Image: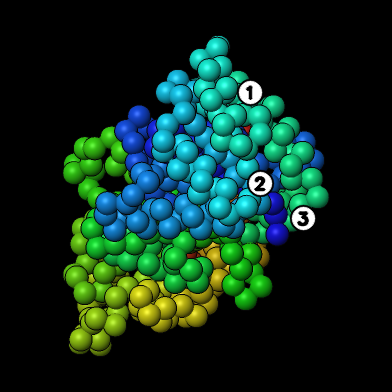
Amino acid sequence: MPATIAIVGRPNVGKSTLFNRLVGKRSALTDPQPGVTRDRREGVVHFGATSFRIIDTAGLEATPHTELENNMQNQTISAITSAHLVLLVIDGRSGLTPLDEYFNDLVRKTNKAALVVVNKSEGSAGDSTQLEAFALGLGEPILVSAQHGDGIFDLLSEVTQLLLGKEQDPNISKDPDATRISIAILGRPNTGKSTLFNGLVGENRVMTGPEPGVTRDAIHVDWTYNKKLLRLVDTAGLRKKARVIDRLEKMSTEDTMKALRFCNVAFLVLDAVQDLQRQDVNIAHNIADQGRAMVIILNKWDLVLQKKEREAYFREQIESSLPQIRGVAIVKCSATRTAGIDVLMQQTFEAHRQWNRRINTSDLNRWLANTTQRHPPPMINKRAVKIRYITQYATRPPRFSLSINRTGGLSDTYIRYLMNELRTAFQLPGTPIRILARARNNPYSQR
């Protein structure tokens, strides 16, 4: 297993900003408002020849007042327990507080190796706080400014020294993302996305609750199913654009859309008890527009009474609302009971295989000849449009190029017809397809 580092501390000391600085990209949401981070978020840090996992955690009060805060505290304690090294972050401008001492006691009780990081120490802002932090008994505090990057090299050098001798996962340096299937879980709020996430990974990895908006960050977890490397991403629920007014919700929505752009397969989670909503269809259109492989999940299936009628309803609605992904896999599932997981993963691997599918050029052109003979392209200005040949130029999703004799010679309607025929002939159900029509250059056009 790779060495793991947990970042802990009270609210608004800059833990997520430090996390973003260490992983080298804006991954965790940051905002002056306290309590933005709720679930623990993971990333990989590369420093020289050393690589390690790092976990961002929620900033907490000493005594939780709500069930949500209690769940957040449990997530933080779980992160500390699983870590090889803990970074206790304090605010260099505010000085040492009783809540910092509370987190210090929490870390010391676990007997984990730890470093004190005095953040927001631009210039000499953290000098006095550094002296106070010696009283925590965790060695010499390290001054950094996560926002400006000051002291980050010194911090990573100290971390590397402490982690020497820890077992390193060889997959980290070999970039497992090249073979890992990335799966993003999307849907409206309260459809059971986080519960499904926990059911798949086999632990309460992210918080769940009946109230909407519990999930804010897109949480990434690497896991293995049947010896296949996977990356699972839980995302915030997507509401209609007109209803998204709060700044944090806008940031969460952007994070969700980013997760969609970088995934391979998207799970669209629907509430099987409710009818198909317009927002469900909008999310499905977004997935198709991004060219991701898709599996639709009818969650809460254990609560459905008239199962045959309900399944027929969803299949009919999806078929009519989403013709561009005709034949998409629909899986009945109960996230709370982890029912239907095996079927879901089988459909996931099949959708991913089709998404990477490459078709032989000769087979494509034989299909094209038969298809255009049955239904030729419409004429333009009483002149025939000829499709000379077809070739597949890319996968993920499958993309095809048509060579035609006239610029603008194929209508969108005819291209959709070719897509549907192609999907049927080569068994590409539910896979987004792209067809680009290009006019062949005429060498005599300038004479």
Q: Nearer the viewer, residue 103 or 74?
A: 103
Q: In the rendering, at what x and y percent does residue 233 appear?
A: 47, 56
State the residue position of label 2: 113
Q: How far apart are marks 3 and 2 (CA)?
A: 15 Å
Q: Which of marks 1 and 3 is nearer the N terminus?
A: 1
Q: Earlier in the sequence, mark 3 or mark 2?
A: 2
CA–CA distance in space, label 1 to label 3: 26 Å
Is residue 292 among the parts visible in the rendering? no
Q: In this view, does 1 lie to the left or right of 194?
A: right
Crowding at mark 2 (Cα within 10 Å: few <14, some 14-19, many 20+): some
**Residue that badge 3 annotates:** 167
- Residue at x 57% of width, y 57% of height: 81
Residue at horizontal 52%, vertical 22%? 129
Front label number (1 vs 2): 2
Residue positioned 18% across, 70% down in the render: 275
The first of marks 1 and 2 along the sequence is 2
* Dot 3 amino acid type: Glu
Query: Label 1 belongs to which residue?
Result: 151
Count neighbours of disc 3 (C-alpha within 10 A) and say few if under 14, some if 14 to 19, many if 20 or more. few
**Helix, strand or loop for disc 2:** strand
Residue 317, percent from left and from top: 24, 70
Image quarter hosting the N terminus: bottom right
Amino acid type assigned to the residue bearing label 1 in the image: Gly
Which secondary structure, mark 1?
loop
